[in-house]
Image: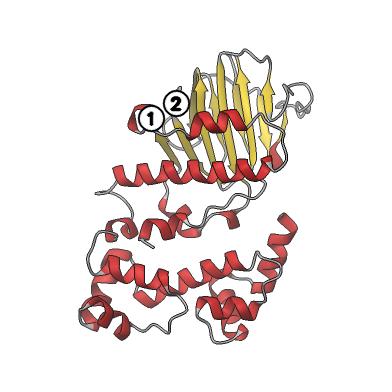
C-alpha cells in the first residue's frame, strides 16, 4: 500500500446524498448543510462556486469540484445572483423565508429543479458524516478543489449521471461506490498535479527511505514496530530515519503509526459484529484497554462511544 492509497482508503460513502439538479438562470443555492465533503460535477451548462472566503470559481460542462465543509458556500449561475434556495442540515431545501421546496421542485428519481430541460444540469454527491472520510484526507485538502474537463480523462461522470436516476435494487450501494471512485479519481489527479506544492505525506511518497517506511507501517500496522526496527527495514540509522521521516511527514514515525492504527480502528469499529478486542489485535494494540486509552486520548471518545455514534448516524 502506497501513501496515496493509504490516504484514499478512508472514503466510504454510506447512504450518501446524491442529486441531479436542473436549473435555469437566474438561480442560486445557498449551502448550509455542514457536510464535511461534497463532490459536484457539471453535466451541461455552467455554474459558479462562491465560497464565503475566497474567490468565486466558474465551472463548465465536465468540470468537477470538491468542496470541504462545514463552512457554508453558494452555487449559482452568476456570483451576483441573490440566493433563492437554502440547503439546510439533512439536505432539507427551502426558500430564504423557510418555505419547504422538496415537493415543489421534485422532477423524479434523485432529480430536482424547475423543469427537466433546464440549461444547467449539476450532479451533487455529499458525504454526510466526517467518519466516512479520513481526517488525514480532510486535513490535506484546501476548501475548494476544481478539476477541469480537459485536465483528465475519466468515464465516471457520465456513468454516475446515468445511474443517479435509476431506482433499482441495490442502487444506493452502487451510487455510494461510484461516488467514492469519483472522489478518489479526482483527488489522485489533483494530487499528482500538485506534486511540488502538495502536502508532506504526498511529497514523501517518492522518497526511497520515508516512502518505504510509510508503506511498511501501513501494510502491517499490527507489527510491534519501533523506530529501530523500522530503520533496519529501510537500511538507515535510527536517528537518520527519525529525522528524515519527521522532516517529510511532519510527525515522528511512531506518531504516524498511532494515527494510522486509530484510523483503521475507527473504520473497523463500524462493523457491528466486530469486538473491540478483535479490532485491537488487528491494529496492533495488546488489549482492548490499550486501544481504548489511545483512542480516547487522540479522538476524545472511547471506541464504544464512537461505535454508538456511527450506529445512530447510519
Residue at (67, 46) in percent of width and height:
15
Identify which residue, 282 or 308, lies in the foreground. Answer: 282
Q: Secondary structure at mark 1?
A: loop
Residue 62 bears which disc, if any? 2
Answer yes or no: do the residues labelled 1 and 2 have beta carbons within 8 Å?
A: yes
Which of the two discs, 1 and 2, labels the residue nearer the N terminus? 2
Q: What x and y, as percent, mark residue 212?
A: 29, 68
Q: What x and y, as percent, mark residue 266?
A: 58, 67
Answer with the quarter of the image where residue 149 lies: top left
Residue at (23, 70) in percent of width and height:
209
Is residue 73 left or right of 232 when viewed as pictured? right
Residue bearing the label numbered 1: 148
Q: Quadrant of the C terminus?
A: bottom right
Identify which residue, 181 or 97, lies in the foreground. Answer: 181
Rendered image coloring scheme? secondary structure
Q: What x and y, as percent, mark residue 165?
A: 66, 29
Q: Secondary structure at mark 2?
A: loop
Q: Where is 100 relative to 251, above or below?
A: above
Few, some or many C-alpha atoms within 10 Å of disc 1 (few <14, some 14-19, many ≥20)? some
Is residue 188 left or right of 117 when viewed as pictured? left
Q: Quadrant of the N terminus?
A: bottom left
Amino acid at each position: 500500500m502506497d501513501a496515496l492509497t493509504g490516504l484514499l482508503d478512508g472514503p466510504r460513502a454510506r447512504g450518501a446524498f446524491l442529486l441531479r439538479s436542473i436549473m435555469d438562470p437566474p438561480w442560486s443555492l445557498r449551502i448550509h448543510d455542514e457536510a464535511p465533503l461534497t463532490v459536484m460535477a457539471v453535466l451541461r451548462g455552467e455554474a459558479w462556486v462562491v465560497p464565503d472566503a475566497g474567490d468565486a470559481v466558474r465551472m463548465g460542462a465536465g468540470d468537477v469540484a470538491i468542496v470541504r465543509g462545514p463552512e457554508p458556500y453558494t452555487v449559482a449561475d452568476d456570483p451576483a445572483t441573490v440566493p433563492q434556495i437554502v440547503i439546510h442540515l439533512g439536505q432539507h431545501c427551502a426558500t430564504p423565508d423557510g418555505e419547504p421546496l422538496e415537493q415543489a421542485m421534485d422532477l423524479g428519481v434523485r432529480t430536482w429543479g424547475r423543469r427537466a430541460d433546464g440549461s444547467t444540469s449539476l450532479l451533487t454527491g455529499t458525504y454526510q458524516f466526517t467518519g466516512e472520510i479520513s481526517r488525514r484526507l480532510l486535513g490535506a485538502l484546501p476548501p475548494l478543489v476544481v478539476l477541469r474537463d480537459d485536465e483528465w480523462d475519466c468515464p465516471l461522470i457520465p456513468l454516475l449521471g446515468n445511474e443517479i436516476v435509476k431506482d433499482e435494487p441495490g442502487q444506493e450501494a452502487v451510487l455510494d461506490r461510484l461516488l467514492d471512485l469519483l472522489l478518489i479519481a479526482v483527488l489522485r489527479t489533483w494530487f499528482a498535479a500538485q506534486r511540488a506544492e502538495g502536502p508532506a505525506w504526498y511529497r514523501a511518497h517518492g522518497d526511497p527511505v520515508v516512502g518505504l517506511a510509510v508503506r511498511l507501517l501501513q501494510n502491517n500496522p499490527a507489527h510491534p514496530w519501533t523506530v529501530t526496527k523500522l530503520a533496519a527495514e529501510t537500511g538507515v540509522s535510527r536517528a537518520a530515519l527519525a529525522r528524515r521521516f519527521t522532516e517529510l511527514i511532519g510527525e515522528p514515525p511512531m506518531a504516524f503509526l498511532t494515527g494510522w492504527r486509530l484510523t483503521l480502528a475507527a473504520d473497523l469499529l463500524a462493523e457491528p459484529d466486530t469486538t473491540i478486542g478483535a479490532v485491537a489485535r488487528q491494529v496492533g494494540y495488546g488489549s482492548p484497554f490499550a486501544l481504548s486509552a489511545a483512542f480516547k486520548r487522540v479522538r476524545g471518545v472511547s471506541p464504544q462511544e464512537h461505535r454508538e455514534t456511527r450506529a445512530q448516524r447510519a
